[in-house]
Image (spheres, rainbow, N blue to C red):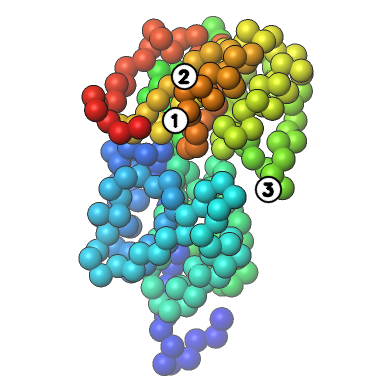
Amino acid sequence: MIQTPSSPPVGTVYIVGSGPGDLDLLTLRAARLVGEADAIVYDHLIAEGVLELARADAEKIYVGKKSSNHTVPQEQLNQLLVRLARAGKKVVRLKGGDPFIFGRGGEEIETLVESGIPFEVVPGVTAAAGCAAYAGIPLTHRDHAQAVAFATGHLKDGSINLDWPALARPKLTVVFYMGVGGIAEICRQMIAHGLPASHPAAVVQHGTTRRQRVLTADLATLPERVDAAGIASPALIIVGTVVRLQEKLTWFTPPAGSPI
């Protein structure tokens, strides 16, 4: 983009992950950038309290996404980042978890590159790592899982058409993001492609926060138990024999009286 003497310098967009929910898991760099930003474009699932770190005069723009309910369509959001940067602002694009793990950070950066906008990426603790840790479920363990896979439970077209043979394998922990709405199909496919119905599985809702709930079961009974418990998004599904360790290894107890 050609600059004229009267035009402001192009600002920078910082794609920042705020972690899985507990404000203490925010990185130092993320906290500093939030405090310095001229504009903060933020999602629905950001760490509680993170916006309190912002300057009083910072522009705060909510662009949160819930299932089938997007405040701002993705392409409009991408262009919003471009406009703010071209106005010379220091822009923080604040996301839950990590920007590059089901956070659409790559899509937004593609637009920034095409528009000649400077950017940086600030990683965050992704939900799988944070929520599993607070639930007492190690994602890998020498006796249970030598590999871990992150999968989306909700594809761009709304389907759950995944590589099921690759996911339904022994000695593997699979974490499904955004999958509670399709949990019955996920469990059915994992059984159909080789895992026993008794294979351990869990759901972690509002992980790392005072609202955290953990439910453990097996693939055959998990959907019914989740429905009976009234568990909904935001929640992760964890499939693997590491779930058997949860009762022994659990350490985080949300404060009594925490809201559900």
Residue 105 visible (yes or no):
no
User: Disc 2 designates what residue?
Assistant: 215
Alpha carbon separation for disc pair 2 and 3: 27 Å
- Amino acid under disc 3: Lys
First in residue order: circle 2 vs circle 3: 3
First in residue order: circle 1 vs circle 2: 1
Please name whichever residue, 15 or 4, is drawn nearer the observer in this view of the structure: 15
**Quarter that holds the N terminus:** bottom right
- In the displayed structure, does residue 132 sit left or right of residue 29? right
- In the displayed structure, does residue 236 sit left or right of residue 6? right
Q: Can you say whether 189 is above or below 34 in the image?
A: above
| Residue furthest front in the image | 228
Q: Can you say whether 220 is above or below 6 in the image?
A: above
Residue 55 in picture, x, y percent from top left:
24, 63
User: Disc 3 designates what residue?
Assistant: 156
Q: Residue at x 45, y 42 (%)?
A: 97
Q: Can you say whether 82 is above or below 229 in the image?
A: below
Residue 162 in picture, x, y percent from top left:
73, 33
Alpha carbon separation for disc pair 1 and 2: 9 Å
User: Disc 1 designates what residue?
Assistant: 205
Please name whichever residue, 234 or 27, is drawn nearer the observer in this view of the structure: 234
Give the crowd class for mark 2: few <14, some 14-19, many >=20 residues within 10 Å: some
The reply to whether discs 1 and 2 touch (Cβ–Cβ < 8 Å) is: yes
